[in-house]
Image (spheres, helix red, strand yellow):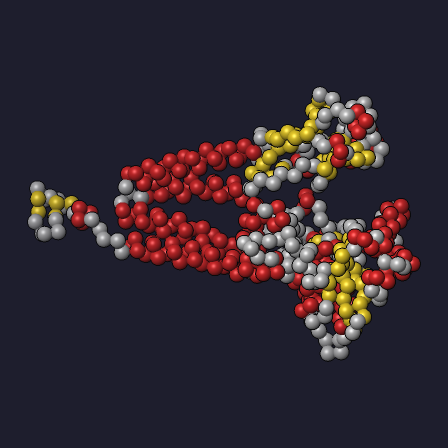
Amino acid sequence: MNLLRRTLATLAVAGVVATLVLMATRFDLIRVTEPLDPTETSAGGGLAYRNPIPTLYAPFFTVAPPEAAALQVLISGSWHRCTADAPQVARHGSGRCASGNTYLTWSRPDNADPRVAQEPTFVRYPVRATPELLIAVLALPVIFGLGAAFATTARRAVAVVGVIPLVPGALLMGANLVGLFMPLRSPTLTEMQSNYGPGDLRYSYEEAAQLLEWRADDTPLSFANRANDAIAGSVLHFWTESRFREFRIVVPAWENWLIRLLGQVDPAFAEYIFWDPWKTIERGVGTCGHVSSALVGILRERRIDARMVTLFGHVVVTAEIGSGVWHIFDPDLGIVIPYDLPTLQKREDLLREAYGPVIRSFPLEPDILAAFEDMLVNAYLDSATNHIDPLGRESYHSGLRAFGLWHSALEPHLYRMKWLVPAGLMLLGGVIVAAASCWPRRADARRTPTLAGTHTASGMTTP
């Protein structure tokens, strides 16, 4: 018994030390330094240049977010903290730098072109433990400390062993129950100002669900048109890292703690793309690929052959709305083009006729709108890179695989297991604790003191 208590006490002390070390990472005390690849340096406008920000793929650790302004760049022997924004770097240069979601915007102190200077440049950024790891490690000294204090007999030691799976199981089950009453769509989503204008988010999840019901007079074409509009109007075009947690792009533990856990280990699950189209609509935020996947899923539920089309820098949907008749649907912009992909790859006029009026209605500068329209039109015309997924949408989700399962099979399993695992842990812990309550007491434990002496099991009293 003493050995068990010493072991638990040692683990509790180790947990305290680990907690202190991980808490230090939250204050940006641990930093990583990496060289910037000069071959990836590109012009960023004005005096600015851009490089991809190094991505950290370490389980349960992440790079400090851009808004922390904790990233630094070593230029010409001096460290420069990235506290400026990109326009300031472009206008003033002089060693300023800015960190965004995926790119570092920086300048040299002499405003020279770094691609010509060929001087080694380094970036230093803080590494933080994720809140999930910090909470888990913080719980260890509490659990082991209480266990060391409580496990004074064999009976109590068995009870401690039962509590170890019982408590996590109860917490996970509690998170699942909270999720039953929590909306997946963030309440602050309606406050967002989209580059696509106020019409980008017109429907609530409930309104979209009504539009996606099959009506008695529906045809494949009428339903596909309405589904395209419903998804375009209920999912905000947005994908900015600084608000991933707020908009549930990082799946909350109460929605599915298994997906959240996988996101700590595999980056593909960190910024999660739902396979279930209804989950995508309920969350209400995404980009062209997410809404195209949702539209394909909804149409296939209605036995309409629909497939994702991957263009250069954009994703749309092609659907068979009649025997051998295919149309293009863009649920990101709410556009329907009554032609098939081979036709559009040869008809720039049809593309500009479809996209031009919609894009020009966005609240952006005219030159930005013109560039956006050109990008989308050229995406279709670049037929060499266009790809239609013969399986519908499996190719787009191919990176989301785990345990040997494709995403289409994995996600339903994760939603079942989020209930089964806590139930199993609670059942196991409950059985062990119940067994501990029936544990036979030691003979000397049955000895009770009396005023005259000690009363034993045989009834004799000893002085």
Front residue of 59 and 144? 59
Considering every residue shown, the one lying at the far right of the view is 349
Residue at the image point whose x is 28% and y is 49% from the top? 155
Whether residue 454 is visible here, answered yes or no, is yes
- Residue, x 30% and y 53% (percent of image)? 436
Count of numbered marks: 0
Quarter of the view holding residue 437: bottom left
Quadrant location of the C terminus in the rendered image: top left
Relative side of 15 to 76, left or right: left
- In this rendering, does residue 87 appear at all? no
- Quadrant where the N terminus sits is top left
Residue extending farthest front: 384
Residue furthest toward the top?
Answer: 77
Instruction: Work out whether 349 lies above or below 442.
Output: below
Q: Position of residue 236 (x, y in %)?
A: 73, 55
Viewed as shown, does residue 159 lie left or right of 289? left
Which quadrant of the structure image shows residue 4? top left
Decide which of 354, 207 is in the foreground and name it: 354
Compared with residue 430, is residue 115 higher up or lower down, i.e. above or below? above
Residue 175 position in % (x across, y down): 52, 54
Residue at 51% of width from left, 57% of height from top?
418
Q: Position of residue 262 (x, y in %)?
A: 56, 49
| Residue 360 screen position, x and y as percent | 88, 53
Q: Residue at x 9, y 52 (%)?
A: 459
